[in-house]
Structure formats: C-alpha cells, structure tokens
Image: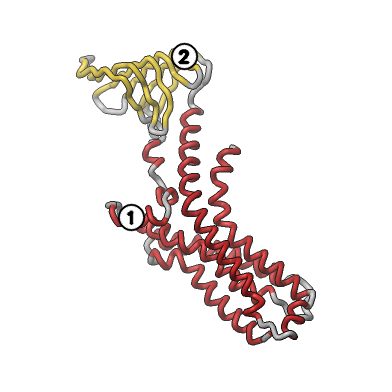
C-alpha cells in the first residue's frame, strides 16, 4: 500500500501545486495587507504590479516545475503503479503453501468457464497444474503443465501440453509447449492498455494521435488529455492572477477574506474542470474548450479583478 501511495504521489503533487501556490499567495498578501504593509508601499509609490511581480515569477517557476513533473515523472510512475496493481490482483488468487486444491472461473451468468487443479503452491509458483477450459462451445481444452506463475498478461505455464477434446471424447489436436499464457477473469493485457494517455508525455501523446488509428471516442479522450497537459500547469499562474486582488483587503477589514474566497475558487475550479472534461469526452464540447474552459473563465475573472485593484491602490 505504501508503494502504491508513493507511485501515485507525483500526479497528486501536480494537481495540488496550483492550490498550494494560491493559498501561499493569499496568506502572504493578506498578512501584508492586515499589517498595513500594502498601505505603506502604496504611500511610497509602489503599485500593485511591482508588489505582485515576484509572486508571478514564483508562479511561473512552479508552473514549469509542474509541467516538468507531469512530463517526466508522472508517466513512469503511473505505468509502474498500474503494473503493480495488476500484479497484486493476480497474486491474491494464489493460496501460498496449499497442496492439491481446485478453484474455478465462472461467466457472468454463473456457468463454469475454467477449472484449475494445482498440485502444490510454493513461493507464488504453481506446480503440476491442470486447466480445463470450457470457454469454447463444443470443445474442452485441457492444459497440463509442470509449473506456472502470474504475469501482467495472465498466468504463464511452462513445460506442458494442451489438448482439444470434442464433446464425443475425440482428441482433435495436441500441442506441446515450453511456455503458454492463459488469460482469465480480468483481461489483464486489455486493462494495461487503458488510459494510456496518462502514461505518455505531451510529445509521445501527440505522436500517438498523429500516427495511430483509434476510435473517435478514444481520440476525443486522448486529445483532451493532450491539451490538459498544458492547461493544468498554467492553472498555477491563473490562480495567482485571481488570488492577488482577492488577498489585498481594505484597511478596515480585519479578517482573512481572501482565504475564504480561495477555498471557494478551488472548489469551483475542480467542479468546472470535472464537468467540462466530462462534456468533452461525451462530445458536447470541443477537446480544447473542455481542457481550457476553467482557465479561460478564471483568467477573465482574475484579469477584471486585478486591473480593478491596480486602479484602486495605484
């Protein structure tokens, strides 16, 4: 569990960097405002643009850091996290140390699909395995192997033979193998290929969209992911644009009004983000609009508040 948390930590950091920068901006400027430091700066002829300049520089640096993490660390960690989860999913079905046991796989309707007999399980390796596969109507496939192990693709059996038997008992064919992979239950290989957009950086995803034939639905989702890889880091700068004017309170206001607004902004942003991406994936919004709509709304609002505050305190 700790490793899974560690592997998913970079993606969480990328999502929370804009929130952290917004709260840091609001708390810092609000403290200066409540201590009348902003009033003193104003009396010395320092306008809001000069006050906010280092904050915007910090926001740009954090935005670049977020983009760098999202491009280099997140894809690798996401892939490893998925591989680990699927490996654990396969391992949980292996009863360590047990001998001569049987377990079965059934279809959604409850009928028998496969029956597994295992002579012994030791160190997550199955020995003397027999598999009866009833998935194909009219035939039964029998697989016997010396040993088997789990893998992301399914169960890999080694040194064995596979027989296909008709309903009348006739052996249709016999195949000897050194290794054979059996997929069962959850299609692990298909699961590994889901959400591949999260496992590619911007360049790889753009090349994938340009060179690969995929369904319109998947192309829509991947295109939104592509635009979002730029939109999410830029959110840090947008939050600062909105946070600076909200953090500077009038002299007679003696409470942290900007902090309350920040909580509401963060909540509204992620609600709008979730809705716009959902509408985009459904085809109701263009991919670019779906990814950038929250930033567009906050930029318009933030720009209006910022320049209003510039003319107020300059």
Describe residue 312's horizontal placement relative to residue 121 as left or right.
right
Describe residue 20's horizontal placement relative to residue 97 as left or right.
right
Q: Which residue is mark 1?
A: 207
Q: Quadrant of the C terminus?
A: bottom right
Compute the Cα span from label 2 to label 1.
48 Å
The image's colour scheme reads secondary structure
Q: Residues within 10 Å of mark 1 (few under 14, many from 20)?
A: few
Among the 4 quarters of the image, the one containing residue 25: bottom right
Residue 180, percent from left and from top? 32, 24
> Which of the pair 288/34 is nearer the observer?
34
Q: Vertical placement of 189 versus 304: above or below?
A: above
Among the 4 quarters of the image, the one containing residue 37: bottom right
Q: Quadrant of the N terminus?
A: top right
Among the 4 quarters of the image, the one containing residue 38: bottom right
* Residue drawn at x 46%, y 14% as measured from the top left: 120
Residue 120: mark? 2
State which mark lies toward you, 2 or 1.
Answer: 1
């Amino acid at each position: 569990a700790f490793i899974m948390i560690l592997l998913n930590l970079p993606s969480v950091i990328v999502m929370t960097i804009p929130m952290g920068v917004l709260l840091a901006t609001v708390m810092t400027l609000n403290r200066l405002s409540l201590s009348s430091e902003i009033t003193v700066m104003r009396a010395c002829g320092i306008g809001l643009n000069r006050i906010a300049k280092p904050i915007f520089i910090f926001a740009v640096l954090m935005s670049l850091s977020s983009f760098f993490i999202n491009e280099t660390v997140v894809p690798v960690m996401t892939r490893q996290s998925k591989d680990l989860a699927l490996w654990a999913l396969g391992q949980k079905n292996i009863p360590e140390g047990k001998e001569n046991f049987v377990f079965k796989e059934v279809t959604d309707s409850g009928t028998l699909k496969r029956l597994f007999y295992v002579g012994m399980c030791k160190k997550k390796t199955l020995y003397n395995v027999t598999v009866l596969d009833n998935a194909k109507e009219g035939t039964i496939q029998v697989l016997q192997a010396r040993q088997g192990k789990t893998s992301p693709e399914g169960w890999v059996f080694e040194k064995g033979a596979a027989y296909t038997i008709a309903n009348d008992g006739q052996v249709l064919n016999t195949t000897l193998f050194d290794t054979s992979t059996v997929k069962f239950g959850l299609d692990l290989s298909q699961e590994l290929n889901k959400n591949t957009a999260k496992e590619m950086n911007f360049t790889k995803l753009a090349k994938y969209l340009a060179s690969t034939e995929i369904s319109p639905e998947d192309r829509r989702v991947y295109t939104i992911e592509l635009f979002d890889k730029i939109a999410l880091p830029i959110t840090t700068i947008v939050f600062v644009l909105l946070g600076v004017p909200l953090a500077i309170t009038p002299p007679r206001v003696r409470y942290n009004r900007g902090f309350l607004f920040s909580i509401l902004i963060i909540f509204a942003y992620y609600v709008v983000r979730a809705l716009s991406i959902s509408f985009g994936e459904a085809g109701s919004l263009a991919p670019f609009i779906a990814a950038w709509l929250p930033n567009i709304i906050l930029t318009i609002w933030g720009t209006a508040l910022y320049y209003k505050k510039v003319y107020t305190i300059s």
